Amino acid sequence: MIEIKFFHDVLCPYCFIATRRLMNVAKDYKDQVIVRHKSFMMISSIEDLKDIAPTIEEARELFKNEFSILKKYIPDYDPEKVINKGKIGYIWSLPPQMACKAAEFQKGDEGHWEYYKRAQEKLFFEGEDITSDDVLIEIAKEVGLDIERFKEDFKSKKAKLAVIQDEEEAHAMGIHGVPAVLINDKWLIRGVQTEDYYRQVIEDLLKNGGEPKTVNLKAYWEQ
């Protein structure tokens, strides 16, 4: 059995690509691979965002540039069309990450992944403010969560602590950016990888008792 800890942020365009690739691979190894979802905050506070983007217009320009990263992977993607919907302004990582944890409280890692995937679609394709309570609750409805329980959890101290604990774990492993994948609490893979690469890693580790033989991996403490 292989355990993969996938560190990501809803606001991260690279995570959007990595999520779909890892999801496609993981479903082929359901009985051999467990994916644990871990939160990481690219924008830890509104104040941090305002330091680099003092106005709403500057914040939208910043996010348009970030969203443009997706054009590398999705050629017909139009970040300007998304941003011009006017709903995205001062958004930050904690609210949607706490909402993902609330989903996880109900449906485990699969629930986290399903909620996270839909939240990213809302952000990157529908231009929704995924820090808005209404949007976060709408996502919960769409993915079939118990709404009353979600409302109790998505702003709770428990959810906030879960996000903070994930981030502390990431920093302890030398992870300071996402996406990042930690395998069996040892092997660290940074950045966006191809589906073929993820498959090669999984096959190598499964065949060799968790130790890489054909793929060059490094432990987190070696990076």
Image: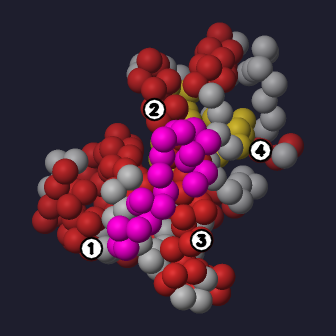
Q: Tell me if I can see residue 172 in this picture.
A: no
Residue 199 sits in which quadrant? top right
The numbered mark, 1 or 2, whose residue comes first in the sequence reads 2
- Judge the density around disc 4: few (<14), some (14-19), many (≥20) Cα neighbours within 10 Å: some
Q: In the image, is residue 82 part of the stretch drawn in magenta? A: yes
The residue indicated by pointer 3 is: 62
Q: Residue furthest right?
A: 222
Residue 18 sits in which quadrant? top right
Residue 181 location (% of width, % of height)? 63, 41
Residues at marks 1 and 3, CA–CA distance in whole angstroms: 23 Å
Residue in front for this viewpoint, 55 or 169: 55
Residue 12 location (% of width, % of height)? 55, 56
Circle 3 SS class = helix
- Tag 4–tag 1 contact (CB < 8 Å): no
User: In the image, what residue occupies the spot 28% across and 65% down?
Assistant: 136
Magenta part of the protein: which range? 68-87
Circle 1 SS class = helix
Residues at marks 1 and 2, CA–CA distance in whole angstroms: 27 Å
Residue in front for this viewpoint, 23 or 63: 63
The residue indicated by pointer 2 is: 23
The numbered mark, 4 or 1, whose residue comes first in the sequence reads 1
The residue indicated by pointer 1 is: 133
User: In the image, what residue occupies the spot 45% across and 32% down?
Assistant: 23
Q: Amino acid at mark 1?
A: Asp
User: In the image, what residue occupies the spot 31% across and 74% down?
Assistant: 132
Depth-wise, is mark 2 or mark 4 nearer the camera? 2
Q: Amino acid at mark 4?
A: Tyr
